[in-house]
Image (cartoon, grey):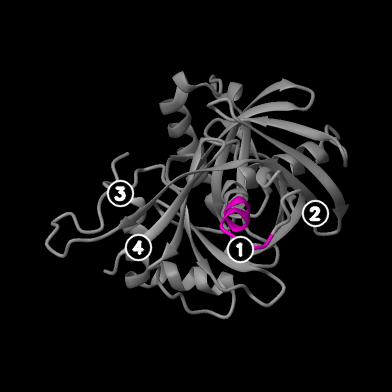
């Protein structure tokens, strides 16, 4: 395997590893097609494993391959990945990519003002609006694909959960309904119940138009902290935990809150994570396909690295310990 160079960011505490050189070429006419190719091609997926597995990564690592866009209307495309495979959406990653695109000069930006970074992701086209002041990125707000409610009060594990879409499907339920709060001391218990609910409801989540988006991506357990203030943890993939408030999950939560009449277009939800970091989410508009949302936060560069694989290394592309 050739050396692979990356730049790492953190968005509200959640890691995001961007492959900048040495990544695989992923065939496909669209980003959605490239995702299917990547997850079914061992030579391509070996690069994901190298970067996400220990000893180069860890069980909660996250990252992406930058790929060509679907057409000239976007600056680039992206394949998001985690320890178990490839996701259809990633809000914290979109925020990091917006900051990286401007800071690296990939997308030219004025030192003061807003710049749109248009990105094709497996669930559609999103826009990261990057605000700069004095040449420094001070905010990134991404406009997501339409979000909608799929099902309400679905029985699971002795409780009920709501299912909504924000680029991926999430099952949502109050943490109190399973006797927990979204706090670090309940971390292991939140993972256990989140994983159980995800797999129990996985087959219920069927996208109305694109079967490639089927399945529950994660379980969101939340605490209500006020009228427009919630704290949540998203347990996604197979027991992976989002340290951020979860960008696509924020969109999915907004769809449910809007359906309940708890948030209107223009109002802002303060969405807090299990480690106390925050995103702001708001509804931009409401249409036949669902609500259009905007989620804002900030990402910071944490380092760069070039990873290699010694052909004599018995651990190969590594391992995951959960």
Secondary-structure class at tag 2: strand
Image quarter where the C terminus lies is: top left
Residue 303 percent across, percent down from the top left: 42, 46
Q: Residue at x 53, y 20 (%)?
A: 180
Q: Which residue is mark 3?
A: 56
State yes or no: residue 47 in magenta.
Answer: no
Q: Which residue is mark 4?
A: 4
Q: Which residue is mark 1?
A: 121
Distance from label 2 to label 3 (Cα)? 39 Å
- Residue 290 is marked as 2
Mark 4 and 1 residues: CB-CB less than 8 Å, in contact?
no
Mark 4 and 2 residues: CB-CB less than 8 Å, in contact?
no
Secondary-structure class at tag 1: strand
Tell which tag, 3 or 1, sits nearer the viewer. 3
Above or below, 268 relative to 109 = above
Residue 46 percent across, percent down from the top left: 32, 64
Evaluate whether residue 145 shows in this view: no
Q: Which residues are magenta?
A: 98-108
Mark 2 and 1 residues: CB-CB less than 8 Å, in contact?
no
Distance from label 3 to label 1 (Cα)? 25 Å
Q: First in sequence, mark 2 or 1: give its number.
A: 1
Image quarter where the N terminus lies is: bottom left
Q: First in sequence, mark 3 or 4: give its number.
A: 4
| 22 to the left or right of 121 | left
Q: First in sequence, mark 4 or 2: give its number.
A: 4
Tell which of 153 and 195 is nearer to you: 195
Distance from label 4 to label 2 (Cα)? 39 Å
**Pointer 2 local density, CA inside 10 Å: few below 14, some 14–19, many at least 20:** some
């Amino acid at each position: 395997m050739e050396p692979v160079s990356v730049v790492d960011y953190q968005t509200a505490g959640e890691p995001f590893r961007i492959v900048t050189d040495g990544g695989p070429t992923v065939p496909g006419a669209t980003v959605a097609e490239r995702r299917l190719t990547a997850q079914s091609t061992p030579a391509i997926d070996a690069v994901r494993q190298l970067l996400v597995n220990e000893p180069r990564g860890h069980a909660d690592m996250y990252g992406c391959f930058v790929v060509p866009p679907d057409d000239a209307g976007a600056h680039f495309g992206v394949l998001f990945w985690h320890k178990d495979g490839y996701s259809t959406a990633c809000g914290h990653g979109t925020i990091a990519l917006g900051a990286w695109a401007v800071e690296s000069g990939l997308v030219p930006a004025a030192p003061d003002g807003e710049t749109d970074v248009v990105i094709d992701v497996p669930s559609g086209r999103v826009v990261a609006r990057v605000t700069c002041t004095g040449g420094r990125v001070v905010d990134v707000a991404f406009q997501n694909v339409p979000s909608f409610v799929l099902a309400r009060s679905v029985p699971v594990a002795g409780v009920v959960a709501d299912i909504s879409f924000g680029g991926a499907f999430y099952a949502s339920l109050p943490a109190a309904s399973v006797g927990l709060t979204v706090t670090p001391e309940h971390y292991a218990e939140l993972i256990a119940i989140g994983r159980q609910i995800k797999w129990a409801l996985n087959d219920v989540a069927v996208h109305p138009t694109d079967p490639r988006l089927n399945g529950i991506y994660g379980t969101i357990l939340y605490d209500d902290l006020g009228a427009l203030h919630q704290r949540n943890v998203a347990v996604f993939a197979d027991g992976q935990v989002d340290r951020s408030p979860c960008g696509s999950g924020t969109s999915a939560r907004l769809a449910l809150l809007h359906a309940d009449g708890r948030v209107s277009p223009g109002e802002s939800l303060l969405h807090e994570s299990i480690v106390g970091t925050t995103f702001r989410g708001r509804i931009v508009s409401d249409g036949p396909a669902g609500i259009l949302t905007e989620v804002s936060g900030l990402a910071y560069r944490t380092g760069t690295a070039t990873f290699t694989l010694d052909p004599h290394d018995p651990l190969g592309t590594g391992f995951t310990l959960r």
